[in-house]
Image (spheres, grey):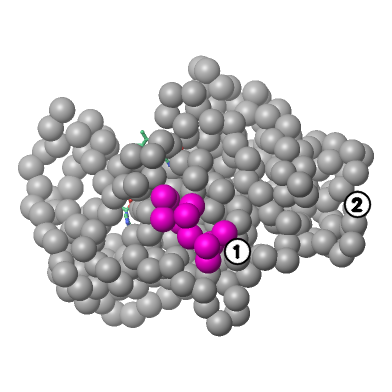
Amino acid sequence: MWPSAFEYQRPVSLAEALQVLSDHEDAKVLAGGHSLLPAMKLRLAEHEMLVDIGRLSELKEIITIRNGGVKIGALATHAEIAASVDVQRACPALASAAGMVGDQQVRNWGTLGGNLAHSDPASDPTTVVLACGGTIQIQSASGSRSVSADDFFIDLFTVDINPGELITSVELPDLSRHKSAYVKMAHPASRYAVVGVGVVLEMSGNTCTSARVAVGGATVKPTRAPGAESALAGSTLDEAALNAAADAVKSDIADMLIGDMNYPEDYRQEMAGVYLKRAVRAALS
Ligand SMILES: Cc1cc2nc3c(=O)[nH]c(=O)nc-3n(C[C@H](O)[C@H](O)[C@H](O)COP(=O)(O)OP(=O)(O)OC[C@H]3O[C@@H](n4cnc5c(N)ncnc54)[C@H](O)[C@@H]3O)c2cc1C
C-alpha cells in the first residue's frame, strides 16, 4: 500500500532539523522508519511533512560520560547498541535487550530514539530504559530539557514529547556494579514482546538492598512494579522472595493490562510473574 502524499525534508544539521520542526507544527520526525512508514502505508497515520533526521551524525554517538554512565544518541541503532562496549559495561541489560529486538534487519534500521518516541507497548528498549532509571534528553528550537524515564511514558503510544521537539539522546547511569537483566516472551512472528521484564538489583553480599523492576508487553506502557521491588529489596533473592515478588508484580500491573485473542490479559499477567523470576535469576547468573 502507498502512504498519502507528503513533503520530505532532509536537514544536514540538528539546528536545521529543529528549525524545520519549529516552522511546521505538523511535521513528523523520520528516523529508522520501521514504525512510522508501516503506519503511513496502512493509512493508520497521515503526515503532511516528514523530517528525515537520518543524516544527523551528532545524534549517532554512543559515549561513556563523566559519572561512568553512558550517553546514547537518539539515532544509534539497536544493532549498534547491542555491539557497544560502553553500553555492555554500563548497562548490560540494554545491550542485551537491543540484541533481542526483531530480526537483524530491524536492528540495523530501528533507532533508540524512534523506539522510545513511538513507545509501542510491545517494545523492549522502553522497558529496560525505565528499569535502568534512564533520562531522555529532548531539544527544540527554543531550548532543551531532560525527562526521567519514570515520567516520560504517559500512556499507550503516548510520551512526553511536544510538537517541535526531538529526542537527542538517552543517558543511563553506571550499573556495572549492579546485577541487571531483561527477559521477554517474544511473539513468534514479529519478535515483539508479549511480556518483557527488566530488573536492576543493587546487592550487598547476598542481600538485595534495592531493586527496580519494569514490565512491558503486558501493559499499555512500560510500568514500574513497586510491590515487586519491595518484595525483592532486603531479601537474599531466595525462592520465597521470588514467589512474593511474582505475586506482587501481578497486582502492580493489574490496572495497566492489555491483551489480544492469542495472549489475553490474564495470561500476560500470569506470565509477568514467571518472567520476573526469570529476570532475577538471569541477573544473578
Ligand atoms: C518487523 C518488525 C519487528 C519489530 N520487532 C521489535 C521488537 O521485537 N522489539 C522492539 O522493541 N521493537 C521492534 N520493532 C520496532 C523497531 O525496533 C524500531 O525501534 C521502531 O520501529 C522505531 O524506531 P525507528 O527508528 O524505526 O523510528 P521511526 O519509525 O522512524 O519513528 C517512530 C516514531 O518516533 C518518532 N521519532 C523517531 N525518532 C525520533 C526522535 N529522535 N525524536 C522524536 N521523535 C522521534 C517518529 O516521528 C515516529 O512517530 C519492530 C519493527 C518491525 C518493523
> CB under 8 Å between callouts 1 and 2?
no
> Type of residue at label 2?
Thr
Query: At 23% across and 41% down in the image, what residue appears?
Result: 37
Q: Amino acid at mark 1?
A: Arg
| Mark 2 nearby-residue class (10 Å; few <14, some 14–19, many ≥20) | some
Q: Is residue 273 left or right of residue 155?
A: right
Q: Which residue is mark 1?
A: 89
From the image, state whether disc 1 or disc 2 is nearer to you: 1
Check disc 2 and report the residue beneath it: 236
Q: Secondary structure at mark 2?
A: loop
Name the residue rendered at 76%, 47% in the picture: 285
Estimate the x, y position of residue 219 in percent, counting from the top left: 57, 39
Between 39 and 67, the one lying in front of the other is 67
**Quarter of image, res 208:** bottom right
Q: Would residue 274 appear left or right of 183 to someone viewing this image?
A: right
Identified at 53% across, 66% down, the residue is 86
Residue 85, image x, y percentages = 52, 62
What's drawn in magenta, residue-wise? 78-89
Which residue is outermost to the top?
261
- Number of numbered discs overlaid on the protein picture: 2
- Does the magenta stretch mainly form a helix, a strand or a loop? helix
